[in-house]
Image (tube, grey):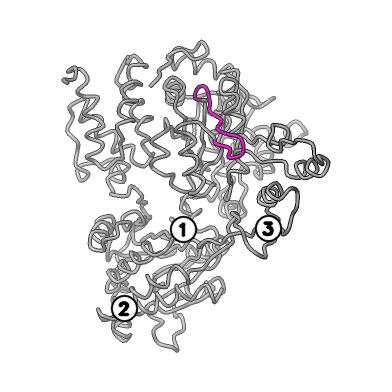
């Protein structure tokens, strides 16, 4: 069957959207064409709006949608993100669309050098031990990650509420007799684990190991969120979703535009909390920050952000590669100031240290 | 797929927009287009947006325009079939069993059935608008269940049989986007992201919603709320806060408070977070509305 020629661009849009990684179903295409017919269409805006509504374009991918729409209907070339000087469009080209700029990027090479020196004194993270630690983590995560009570109930022999529906069914079956009472109890579910990973220059040696760890966490946990903090704030949870580690890490590295840049950890955390949707991820979660906490300047932003995180989260831990030494005490003004707000200051020297911490934090809480 | 371009006398997005305005809800073009398409295509309308931009109000206004009762299902974590569909009245059933003796008794008759929002909406699909509020608060189990409900609009009650809607009811879903909704659910719906309204529209909204606010006050409040939203606040003020702030300040002013002071004293209506208040404390006077007639 051949389609009317006038219909071609209307099929071209869903096709192009699919090519750009939007999830588009045939149903949506049919509805889109019906919607365009309904609206007239009197002008391009009608078609544009119909597409946006029917293909359910999320707000952060709007610029991307707009570019594709122009390419299909107005024959305009899709500009490459590099040529774009409008900042909002650049953001939408990020693979996750979840990137926020953090103000005042500065190269902290001085601090970075210091961190690397200290880091060299720590234990070395060898390939085999990393794999062993990650395997163990995946095996134990289901049981060991922190849990909380769910609002769902399930049948339980000694529960705390009567299961009236089941009791009545039983009574009907037995002529009004209730031989025993059935009870229910609240189920448990895993608490959200929120990993905030510092990918700045001072953490350079650790970045890849951290990403591998983050991938293991996203894979093993029922509910986890991972962000990287550098000069930009990037949500990489979705990038780490593929089970294949190589593919996932490639996607994540692509998403993180600011590996090894400078950072101000306080500003980065403040930027995280300034997005209400992201701040919501921390509510009731087990928050783990992986950072050396080295930064120049006043620690006020760090103190404010840490106190808010500690109030939002169920527990708030700070793991630093510098803490490999058992006698380690935080040296920077910022870390010292936020010690009272942190539930535990731990070591992030090796992957095994971090996985061990995440697996045991349920017990410590 | 049934397309009905004429819904209760509304034949185009502009007509819907005018009708919404008459119902005291000022919608922009994009929202009225999305809502019109949802009605015409018989699909659920999914409204997402920051808290306080008027998602629930939009649904209520839509119900008013269509002359339908709004049945609201407020989602929460752990919401299940008993809270969303139906529940049997167990104490009454128990009493009935005890009193019945040998007489025949139908324990699963209408007398003992407690309808919950989804069943209510199914039973009266032409007279109701089903509002599923804050779907992002529910858990994934409920979302999956809802998916099934929204695709064929049937509920099966094991004890009595299946309830099927004669025609698809009007459904509006809202989400604050505290978590990402499942792609399959979004796909079933007509989607619209409600943004904060622009200054002119928001001033109109304040004038429409508030009882006794002068236009100057409304514009001044809208301007400073715009400044507040540009700050990295934990809880940026929504449209509801704008309206309340304008009203609160007007009230204080009528009782004798001077202008900038009236805004300052009623700041608790707009900023509802201690951190936000202390963050803004030093610069508050530069953000506050100045003179407002």
Quarter of the image holding residue B130? top right
The local secondary structure at tag 3 comes to loop
Q: Is there CB contact under 8 Å for labels 3 and 2? A: no
- Alpha carbon of mark 1 to alpha carbon of mark 2: how far? 35 Å
Crowding at mark 1 (Cα within 10 Å: few <14, some 14-19, many 20+): many
Residue under circle 3? Answer: A182
Residue A284 on image: x %, y %: 55, 60
Q: Residue, x 40% and y 70% (percent of image)?
A: A290
Chain of the residue displaying label 2: A
Residue B226 on image: x %, y %: 51, 38
> What is the quadrant of the N terminus of chain A in the image?
top left
Residue under circle 1? Answer: A270
Q: Is residue B163 magenta?
A: yes
- Alpha carbon of mark 1 to alpha carbon of mark 3: how far? 49 Å
Q: Considering only vertical position in the picture, is B242 above or below A330?
A: above
Q: Which mark lies nearer to you, 1 or 2?
A: 2
Q: Is residue B141 magenta?
A: no
Residue under circle 2? Answer: A132
The residue nearer to you, when weighing A245 against A272, is: A245
Q: Considering only vertical position in the picture, is B183 above or below A151?
A: above
Total residue callouts: 3
Identify the mark nearer the N-term, 1 or 3: 3
- Which stretch did the figure color magenta? B156-168
Identify the mark nearer the N-term, 3 or 2: 2
Quarter of the image holding residue A245? bottom left
The local secondary structure at tag 2 comes to helix
The residue nearer to you, when weighing B49 against B247, is: B49
Note whether residue B290 is visible: no
Residue B164 on image: x %, y %: 53, 28
Identify the mark nearer the N-term, 1 or 2: 2
């Amino acid at each position: 069957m051949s389609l009317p020629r006038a219909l071609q661009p209307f099929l071209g849009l869903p096709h192009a959207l699919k090519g750009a990684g939007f999830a588009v179903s045939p149903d949506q295409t049919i509805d889109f064409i019906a919607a365009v017919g309904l609206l007239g269409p009197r002008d391009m805006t009608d078609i544009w709006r119909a597409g946006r509504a029917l293909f359910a374009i999320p707000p952060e991918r709007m610029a991307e949608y707009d570019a594709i729409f122009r390419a299909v209907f107005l024959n305009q070339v899709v500009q490459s993100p590099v040529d774009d000087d409008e900042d909002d469009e650049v953001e939408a080209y990020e693979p996750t669309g979840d990137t926020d700029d953090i103000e005042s990027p500065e190269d902290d090479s001085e601090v970075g050098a210091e961190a690397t020196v200290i880091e060299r004194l720590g234990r070395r993270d060898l390939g085999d031990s990393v794999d062993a630690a990650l395997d163990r983590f995946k095996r134990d995560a289901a049981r060991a990650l922190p849990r909380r009570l769910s609002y769902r109930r399930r049948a339980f022999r000694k529960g705390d509420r009567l299961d009236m529906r089941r009791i009545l069914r039983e009574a009907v079956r037995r002529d009004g007799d209730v031989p025993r009472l059935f009870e229910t109890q609240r189920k448990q579910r895993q608490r959200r684990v929120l990993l905030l990973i510092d990918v700045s220059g001072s953490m350079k040696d650790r970045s890849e190991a951290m990403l591998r760890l983050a991938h293991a966490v996203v894979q093993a946990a029922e509910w986890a969120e991972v962000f990287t903090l550098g000069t930009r704030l990037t949500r990489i949870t979705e990038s780490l979703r593929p089970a294949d580690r190589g593919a996932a890490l490639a996607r994540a590295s692509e998403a993180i535009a600011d590996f090894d840049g400078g950072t101000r950890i306080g500003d980065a955390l403040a930027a995280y909390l300034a997005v209400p949707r992201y701040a919501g991820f921390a509510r009731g979660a087990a928050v783990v920050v992986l950072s050396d906490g080295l930064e120049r300047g006043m620690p006020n932003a760090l103190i404010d952000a840490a106190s808010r995180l500690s109030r939002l989260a169920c527990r708030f831990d700070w793991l630093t590669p510098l803490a490999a030494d058992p006698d380690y005490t935080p040296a920077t003004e910022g870390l010292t100031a936020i010690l009272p707000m942190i539930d535990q200051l731990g070591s992030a020297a090796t992957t095994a240290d971090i996985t061990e911490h995440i697996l045991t934090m349920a017990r410590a809480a | 797929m049934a397309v009905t371009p004429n819904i209760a006398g509304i034949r185009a997005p502009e007509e819907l927009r005018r009708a919404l305005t008459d119902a005291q809800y000022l919608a922009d073009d994009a929202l009225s287009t999305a809502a019109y398409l949802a009605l015409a295509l018989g699909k659920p309308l999914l409204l997402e947006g920051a808290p306080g931009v008027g998602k629930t109000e939009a649904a209520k206004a839509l119900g008013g325009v269509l002359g339908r009762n709004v049945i609201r299902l407020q989602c929460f974590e752990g919401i299940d079939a008993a809270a969303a569909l139906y529940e049997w009245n167990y104490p009454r059933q128990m009493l009935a069993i005890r009193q019945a003796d040998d007489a025949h008794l139908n324990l699963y008759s209408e007398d003992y059935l407690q309808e919950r929002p989804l069943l209510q909406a199914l039973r009266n699909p032409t007279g109701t608008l089903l509002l599923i509020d804050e779907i992002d608060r529910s858990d994934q189990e409920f979302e999956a269940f809802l998916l099934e409900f929204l695709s064929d609009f049937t509920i099966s009650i094991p004890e009595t049989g299946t309830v099927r809607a004669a025609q698809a009811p009007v459904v509006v879903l809202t989400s604050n986007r505290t978590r990402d909704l499942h792609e399959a659910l979004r796909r079933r719906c007509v989607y619209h992201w409600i943004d904060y309204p622009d200054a002119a529209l928001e001033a109109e909204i304040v004038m429409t919603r508030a009882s006794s606010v002068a236009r100057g006050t409304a514009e001044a409040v809208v301007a400073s709320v715009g400044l507040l939203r540009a700050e990295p606040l934990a809880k940026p003020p929504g449209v509801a806060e704008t309206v309340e702030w304008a009203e609160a300040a007007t009230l204080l002013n009528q009782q004798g408070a001077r202008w900038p002071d009236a805004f300052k004293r009623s700041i608790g209506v707009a900023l509802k977070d201690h951190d936000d208040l202390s963050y803004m404390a030093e610069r508050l006077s530069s953000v506050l509305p100045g003179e407002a007639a």
